[in-house]
Amino acid sequence: MLKFYYNLAPNPTKVALCLEEMGLAYEPVPVDTRKGEQHAAAFLAINPNAKVPAIVDGDQTVFDSNAILLYLAEKTGQFLPGAADRGQMLSWLMFIASGIGPYSGQAVHFRNFAPEPKDYAVNRYTFEAQRHWGIVDARLATHEFMAGSSYSIVDMALWGWSRLVPFVLGPDAMAGYPNVKRHLDLVSARPAAARALALKDKHAFKADMDEAARLAMFPHLGKKVA
């Protein structure tokens, strides 16, 4: 059975949605990153980058969330757009991987976890997160789904992050992205989304962001970089 290494962050959640949408049998394997389990030798053998999610599917090991979505879509033949939209699918899937995720994640880090002084970093990453979400909102103003007229893995990839726009950019931020909100509600209403979110009840992850958790999550805090 496919093993799915996860926690409750946006990137594992999008893979959980994909697995549920495809009806694939899987074993969820929690990796508690605040306890530092991502740095264990056994997990590094699966993902040398010490990040979740990752999957082990027979003799295939795949890490990085959007790579997993593409792998599963090609494996099953599900939730891939037609040939005419393949370029759009790849473009938006990589846009989410290289833009939405990193800039949203760094905006959260500098707004909520980084020590002072941090004004420059907060301004840069908040600006870039807002800019990227604005591009997505404009796309969804003219398309029901990200890769065209049908629901695909790109929509799953976006949903992992769009749920957290208020946390990334502030409690009222979603008002500025009405088309993202429409898309979020559309995907969230799917039964597979409810099943994906129910993973939170399967394992009690560490909630405290104490010093040990900070060092596990942000290893650079324990190292002096020349």
Image (cartoon, rainbow, N blue to C red):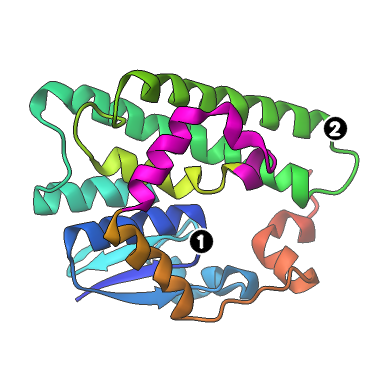
Label located before the other in sequence (1 or 2):
1
Q: Where residue 134 sits in the image (x, y, percent)?
A: 53, 23
Q: Nearer the viewer, residue 13 or 110?
A: 13
Which amino acid type is shown beneath numbered disc 2?
Asp
Dot label at residue 168: none
Q: Which residue is mark 1?
A: 50
Q: Are marks 1 and 2 in contact (CB under 8 Å)?
A: no
Mark in front: 1 vs 2:
2
Horizontal side, residue 199 vs residue 121: left or right: left
Horizontal side, residue 107 vs residue 160: left or right: right
* Residue 140, image quadrant: top left
* Residue 32 vertical placement versus 173 (above, below): below
Q: Which residue is mark 2?
A: 119
Which secondary structure dominates the residues rendered in magenta? helix
Q: Outermost residue toward the right? A: 117
Judge whether residue 79 can be spotted in this image.
yes
Q: Where residue 187 sits in the image (x, y, percent)?
A: 34, 47
Query: In terms of secondary structure, where does tag 2 sit?
Result: helix
Residue at 71% x, 69% y: name it. Answer: 213
- Magenta residues? 166-189
Location of the C terminus (image quadrant): top right
Judge whether residue 61 can be spotted in this image.
no
Q: Nearer the viewer, residue 159 or 175?
A: 175
* Residue 78 vertical placement versus 145 (above, below): below
* Residue 194, image quadrant: bottom left
